[in-house]
Structure formats: C-alpha cells, structure tokens
Image (cartoon, grey):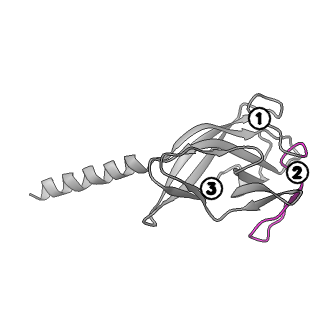
Amino acid sequence: MKKLVVASLLALTSTAWAQTAVKVEDAWVRGTVATQKATGAFMKLTSPESVRLVEASSPVAGLVEVHEMKMEGDVMRMRAMAALPLPSGQPVMLKPGGYHIMLMDLKAALPAGQAVPLTLVFEAADGKRFSQEVRAEARAMGAPGAGQMPGGGHGGHGEHGSQGGHKH
C-alpha cells in the first residue's frame, strides 16, 4: 500500500512538473565588446499554464533583471519589471525594443558564438516557483536576428529608469 501511494505521488509530481515547463525558443544574447558592461537577452516564451517570469540570473553578469521598453510621450524608456505575465498557451516575445532580460555588470565580453547560461525563474498561479536553465547564443550586433535597439545598442537608447533605483 505504501509503495502504491508513493508511486502515485511521484507520478502526480512528475506530471505537474511536465505541465508547467515553459517552452523557450530562439534564445540569444547581443554580443558585446570588452568595455561594454550591459547587454540584452531575447527569446520566445510559451507556457502551457499561466505563469509569470519573476527572476533571471546568469554567471556572466553581476545583475540580471526582466525589463520592458515602451514609449512614454516621445521618449523610449526602459524599466525593470517585478514580473512578466505569460498567459496560458500564448507566446510572449522578448525582443529588442520590447520585453527583454537585461544583463548588467558583465564580468567579461560576450563574443559572437559564445553560449550564455541563463536561469529563468517562473511563478505559477499557486505561488510555487520553478526554474529553467537556458543557453542563449551570443550574436554579433549586425547578425540576422540581432536587431538594433533605438539609439544603436543597449547602452545608448533614450532615457532609462529602473524601479529598483538602479540606473544604467
């Protein structure tokens, strides 16, 4: 009887885990040069259940935040977000000029072709968190898919602010 209960619980747990995995497609990071201290990571996220992207980290950066860029009046502004909602079954694009993951205080340059490890932390509707490891390829600035940000890069586009009081 105990074996049956344990087996049933394990089956339920593994089924729940499989259902909450977020599909990550085309993950990439804009490559950098030695003096550059920040860049963006981009990808397409699709969750089978409604979850929120609440945190990100990477060993290549001292600070990683989920950001949003949007027009306020005639100025493009970038701000950190506490959470990015991922509605059930609907793809959410993290792309230049929109939602993205900001990697700041870079520890070294990220040359084109380098695999950049990222850990994404999601929160389900019940408040439970789970993380997923992602490897994003660094792409050269002019490479296909490495779209330009307004102002020519992640360091010089319009004014930025951040909810945490950190300005870059």
Q: What's drawn in magenta, residue-wise?
A: 151-168
Q: At 73% across and 32% down in the image, what residue appears?
A: 145
Give the image location of residue 17, x and y in percent. Answer: 38, 51
Give the image location of residue 153, x and y in percent. Answer: 86, 44
Inter-mark Cα distance, 2 to 3: 22 Å
Question: What is the crowding at mark 3: few (fewer than 14 residues within 10 Å), some, or many (at least 20)?
Answer: many
Q: Name the residue under label 3.
A: 56
Q: Mark 2 points at which residue?
A: 157
Which element carries disc 3, helix, strand or loop?
strand
**Which amino acid is tagged 2?**
His
Q: Which residue lies furthest to the top in this view?
A: 144
Dot 3 or dot 1, earlier in sequence: 3
Which element carries disc 2, helix, strand or loop?
loop
Give the image location of residue 22, x and y in percent. Answer: 49, 46
Dot 1 or dot 2, earlier in sequence: 1
Total labels: the figure holds 3
- Quadrant assignment, res 57: bottom right
Inter-mark Cα distance, 3 to 1: 20 Å
